[in-house]
Amino acid sequence: MLATSSGSFRPAGTLDAATALLPYRGAWNTRGAAHLLRRAGFGGSPAEVSAFAAMSMDAAVDRLIHFPDTSQLEAAPELVQDTRRKELRAMGLTTEQIKMLGKAHLDNAVALMQWWIGRMIATPAPLQEKMTLFWHGHFTSAYEGKGITAQDILTQNQLYRSYALGNIRKLTLAVSHDPAMLKYLDNRDNRAKHPNENYARELMELFTLGIGNYTEQDVRESARAFTGYMLDDDDQFAFYARQHDDGSKTFLGKTGNFTGDDIVNIIFQQPAASQFFAKKLLEFYVYSDPEPQLVDALAWQLKKNYFELAPVMSVLLRSNVFHSERAYRALVKSPTEFVVGSYKLFSLPQAAVGKPILGAMTRMGQRLFYPPNVKGWDGGAAWINSGTLLTRENLASTLCANPQMMQTATWLTQNASLDPKTLSAHIVTQVLQGDISSASRAQLDAYLNGAGTSALGMLSGENFDERVRGAVYLAMATPAYQLS
Amino acid sequence: MQSRAGFLLGSLSGLTVVAKNADFFGRALAQAPLSGLTGPTDDHVLVLVNLQGGNDGLNCVVPYSMPQYYKYRPTLGVAQSDVLRLNDEVGLNPNMKSFKAMFDRGQVAVIQGVGYPKPDHSHFRSQEIWQTADPEGYSGTGWIGRYLDAAGLPKANLFNAVAVSQVLPELFGSRTIDVPAIDGNLRGYGLASDRKAGGAAAFRSMLSDTTQPFDSPYLGKVAEIEANAQRGSEELPKLVDNYKTDAQYPATILGRSLALASQMIGSQIGTRVIYVTHGSFDTHTSQKPTQDRLLGQFSDAISAFYTDLASHGNDKRVLTMTFSEFGRRVAENASHGTDHGEAAPVFMIGGSVKGGVYANHPSLDDLDNGDVKYTTDFRSVYATVIEKWLGRSPQGIIAGSYPSLPIIAA
């Protein structure tokens, strides 16, 4: 099922628009710290959550906003050549050789996914990766067809990382020069004599303004401005003056001999641009279907900061609305958040992200580098159907059966209690921040206790391993664990 | 015999999970039986077969009467003498003998040249267009999903529509109905931890517990779908267990998927739409062996499916429709394959179909940059299915107005 405008997933209750973006000064504890880490990252290990809870809220946000050095993280993978098949046939390769290159495509895709997911797990700068994921779902390109190579996709991914909390207008300019994007939305074929409107249209419709904030004439005129934004023989951006229409264009009420860069700059002067990004950021970081007053307030922050994202996210992550009960668990975890968060929960090494995990991500609806269309992943209710949820539960079961898990998740074994109630309280605290009903809690107690089961009996050192794994699995299968 | 006091909940990779759950088991048993399980036998069912990867229409329904066909296909062209002739213009690929027999019995309508304006050559995007019936935008719902929303089917029935596939296809994107995705042999459908015992019902209340100490706009939905998923995966194998058949299905994924489809249809569980897949037809290199094999498998699986349906009296209430994201380039390429093209034929199959060949075959003299131009908009086909088969107005389901095709027997 999918979220729709008719079925809003805005949280119940009322927004206090006047104080929504003011700094939160309420209680700060592990629950709040875990919320912050889930949203501004992919969730924390119990140790990270405790460390964040021990700081002030301001210090915790500062830690996330100011990215520490990440140079010790694993370098991007070596990619194999994956030139498009059409070109290869022209080169006269055999069918066998062409098949090898099909395999190269798949190998590259797996290497890129493992590398990025590994980076999300291991990084000391989780917000950098979270923003990279945000931009990947926003300025989408897919590693599929149109001559897009793995290197193009990696270059684009690095671009989004380098602009993670950077200037959105400058990022949009860079995106307009990005090889993967120029291929994905066909601007490489946009010539003065044969304009191709694909990029120009999506730039406004899906990337910056939203439908209703420009006319078809604006699409045509801006496509003219983007003519000649092409690729050279090495697939690098090149401006081909001879393919560029240097005539006068009238775009959003302004007239001049505009280039594509001028178009981007004019777009960011529109009030709709700040509204558009404010809404998208709120839906990704705070809650679905945010109130117009809240969108206005964040849009003002964007304008005031000339679309510099770091100061805006600094305000948002400290704000009353972000830390409000209304925002708490108000989003559905994406498959990426589910996987990375679970790895962090157990401190499993990122090297353990194998192909079965990637396959499960596809079945859960999020194959990284293959967004379903130029609009990106819908998210929210679109993550939830019986197939995706069964996959989540089965993945939780697989992870709980991981032989390494009892060693890496030291919080499970250190000073562990053999008292079922104490143990279940511990698990519920670490996995769910206590977000479980008393009825479910009673079932977990009973399960750990084994009371009445002649086969297994009471919790003991002997059955501790399997009982704990089973209980953690059950905690991960609850609705709360699916929510961020 | 398993005791009710403590039964196996399944195993987690070698370790057995056992719970004390007399209470929960009792509660699970007390659950009301699924409603909507018995439907009237004349309920129409639609089966969609996705020929994934882009099936080469020209070598499937071969325009053997057009000399240009053989010019464009010097090595791949199907010889006139091999073609299974449907009329004076076109014939089926020689590997589709059992399917040809169905055509001869009047159970197959071939709609030629089906496509849409401004064709997209990307697998992803063109699949999306076929599945959402929205070539211009990104509607977020599928054409069948919108039908499910409009049809007012009982929400409590977990099997109003079923995808026999790993991933839920976009065509089922619905605002109100949760469609399960099931694999053909039912093995991967269910909780891994539950595979050995069938006891996960004990935790149903835990997985679908909405009395949480927090409020979330998504909590109710997650809990509901978790319950659906678990309950559905437990119930379906039992619901279809009594269905017996002598039909011999080929041992292919499509054969297994259609066998399950027939089982569901024959078990009267209220299923209206079933989706299965076959492929991959993405034959850029050495097309002939691959496409021949796939078309043969298709032909045999469909034939077995209708034999099975007929032996249970269901063949007239099941309409099967094929689609593929696109046909392929008219000219073969240097690797004895074909590249992504545009329009292609669609098959409508069943005891209620008015058999024959419909619409004009696209001209091979007037190509769109090397591709055949469509002669029938795919939304015409969809509108026909929605109106004449599923009995709804296409309005609100298929945007725009498209003429109905006379392919369903009144």
Image (cartoon, rainbow, N blue to C red):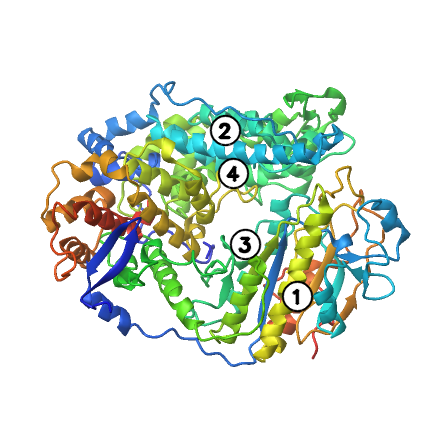
- To the question of a shared chain for discs 2 and 3, the answer is no
The residue labelled by disc 2 is A157
State whether residue B405 appears in this view.
Answer: no
Callout 1 amino acid: Ala
Callout 2: SS = helix
Residue A54 found in image quarter: top left
Q: At which x and y percent is residue A295?
A: 41, 41
Characterize the local packing of mark 3: few (<14), some (14-19) or many (20 or more) Cα atoms within 10 angstroms.
Answer: many
Callout 4 amino acid: Ala
Q: In this view, does A21 lie to the left or right of B73?
A: left
Mark nearest the camera among 4 and 2 is 2
- For the C terminus of chain B, the quadrant is bottom right
- To the question of a shared chain for discs 4 and 2, the answer is yes
Disc 3 to disc 1, C-alpha distance:
18 Å
How many marks do you count on the picture? 4
The residue labelled by disc 1 is B383
Callout 2 amino acid: Asn
Q: Nearer the viewer, residue B300 or B260?
A: B300
Mark nearest the camera among 3 and 1 is 3
Q: Give above or below for B99 relative to A42.
A: below
State whether residue A231 appears in this view.
Answer: yes
Mark nearest the camera among 1 and 2 is 2
Q: At which x and y percent is residue B169?
A: 53, 54
Characterize the local packing of mark 4: few (<14), some (14-19) or many (20 or more) Cα atoms within 10 angstroms.
Answer: some
Residue A33 bears which disc, if any? none
- For the N terminus of chain B, the quadrant is bottom left
The residue labelled by disc 4 is A272
The residue labelled by disc 3 is B170
